[in-house]
Amino acid sequence: MVLEKMKAFLIMLLSAFLIIGIVGCSSGETTSNNESNGEGSNEKQVEIRFSWWGDTKRNEVYNAIVDRFEEEHPNIKVKREFGGWTDYWDRLATQTAGGNAPDVVSMHQFYVSDYARRNALLNLNEYVDAGKINLENFPESTTNSGKVGDDLFMVAKGVTMSGWVYNTALFDKLGVEYPNMDWTWEDFQEKVKEIHKASNGEIWGSADMSGGQLQPNLRYFLRQKGKDLFDDEGKIAFTKEDVIEWWTMWDNLRKEGAIPDAATSTEYEGAPLEQNLFVTGKTAIQQLPANQIYLYQQQFNEGEIQIVRMPHIDGGENGEYIEGAYLSITEKSEHPEEAAMFIDFFVNAEKALELFKVEQGAPGSTEMQEFVKPLLDPAQQRAVEFIQKTVEYGEPAPYAPLGVNEVEQAFKDNASAISFGQKTVAEAAEDFMNTAEGILK
C-alpha cells in the first residue's frame, strides 16, 4: 500500500515536471518569435523592393523617405534599386520579362500602357477601395491620370504641368513686355521675333522646338485642335496637314533668324542644364515642366524665372494634360499589401512629403501640396502655384503605344532634315506620316 502511494506520488511529480517543461519550452518559442519580429511585435517580417530613376540628389531624398517608412513599420524592410533614366527602363524591362521586377516601381505615362497591357502591373482599385491607398485628397484629374481604361495602375507621387519660362531681368533689360499667361501661338511668334529685334540680333527668342520629342509641344498643339498624338487604339490621331502647319511655323521663324540655325541647335542638343541655350543667355524663353523652375533659378543671379501656360490656338481647346512621376505595384509582387502601405506613406505622410517637397512635381494630394508650400523656396512655390492653376485644365491623354520611340525618332529626323534644308516641309511631313503610320498600323 505504501509502495503504491509512493508510485502514485512519483507519477504526479514527473507529470508536474513535464508540464513545467512544456510550458517553459512554449514560452521560449514565443519570446524567440517576438525577438525576431523586432520591437516586441507579432507582425511578420516582410521585405519589399522599390526602384526609381534619378540622380545622386534624388537618391538621397528617396533613401531618406524609405528610412522613415522603415522606422514607422519596423517589420517591413525596403530594398532599394535606382539608376539613371535609360538604365532604369532597360533594367525594369529585363526584370519584368524575367518575372523578377521590384514590388513597387516608379512609373511614367509614356510606359504605363505598355506594362499594363502586358499584365505586368497590379490593378490598384481594390487597394484604394479598401482604404489601403488613400486618394481622397487627389483631384479627380490627377487620379485619372494613373488609369488605363477604368483600372488604376499608378498613383502620382509628383505631378507637373508644362509651360514656357522667361527671366524677368533679361526682359527688363531688353524692354520687352513679359508674355501673358494665356497667350496664343501667334503671340509666341511675335514675342520671339520681338526679342530677337530688341537684342539687335544677339539673342534668339527661343530654341528650335520643331522636332525632338513628340510631347509636350506638338501634343499641346494637336490637342488644341481637338486631336492628339494617338487615339485609344494606339493609332496616329493627326494628319499630314497638322504636321505641315506645325513645321511651317518653326521654319518661318528659323528663316527670319528668330530661332537658332540648324548647326547651332545641333551643337546644343543634349547640353547639360548649365550649358544650354537658355541658361547661357543665347535664348530668352524656354519650354519646361514647372517642377524644374527652381533648377533654372539657381543658375541666375538676377531676375526671377517666371512661367506662363503653353501657347494656345485662338478659339481652340485647352491642350493641358497631367505629367509627372508615379508609383505602381507589379503584378507578381508577393507582398502587395505592404507595397500599398508604402505607396500610401510616400504620397500622404507628412514625414515623406517634407523630404519629397516637389522633387518630381507637386504632390498629387492637394492637402500635401499645401503642407509643403512653406517648406519651399520662392521658385518652387511659383511652380506649385502654376501647377495648381493649370491642372484644372488637364484632360486625359491616350497613352503612348508600342513603337512610339521609332515614331519619335522619325519625327526628329524629318524636323532636322527641314532645318538643314535637306527636305521641304511638305516632303518631310509626307515621309514622317508614312513612317509613323507604318509603325503604328
Image (tube, rainbow, N blue to C red):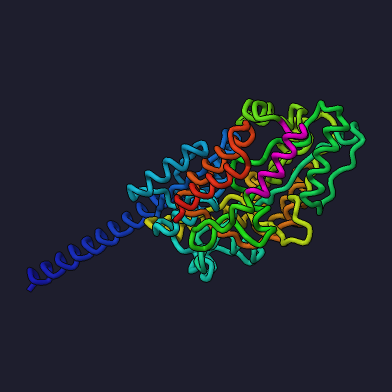
Q: Residue 360 location, x and y as percent?
A: 63, 46
250 drawn magenta: yes
107 drawn magenta: no
144 up-or-down from 403: above or below: below
What residue occupies the far right of the structure in this picture?
175
Q: Residue at x 62, y 60 (%)?
A: 227
84 up-or-down from 348: above or below: above
Q: Nearer the viewer, residue 234 or 146?
A: 234
Instruction: Locate the N terminus and report the quarter of the image it occupies.
Output: bottom left
Q: Residue 19 location, x and y as percent?
A: 24, 64
Q: Which residues are magenta?
A: 244-260
User: Taking 22 as reference, is 38 left or right?
Assistant: right
Residue 43 appears in the rendering:
no
Residue 9 appears in the rendering:
yes
User: Taking 97 as reference, is 228 left or right?
Assistant: right
Q: Nearer the viewer, residue 281 or 190?
A: 190
* Prevailing secondary structure of the magenta residues: helix
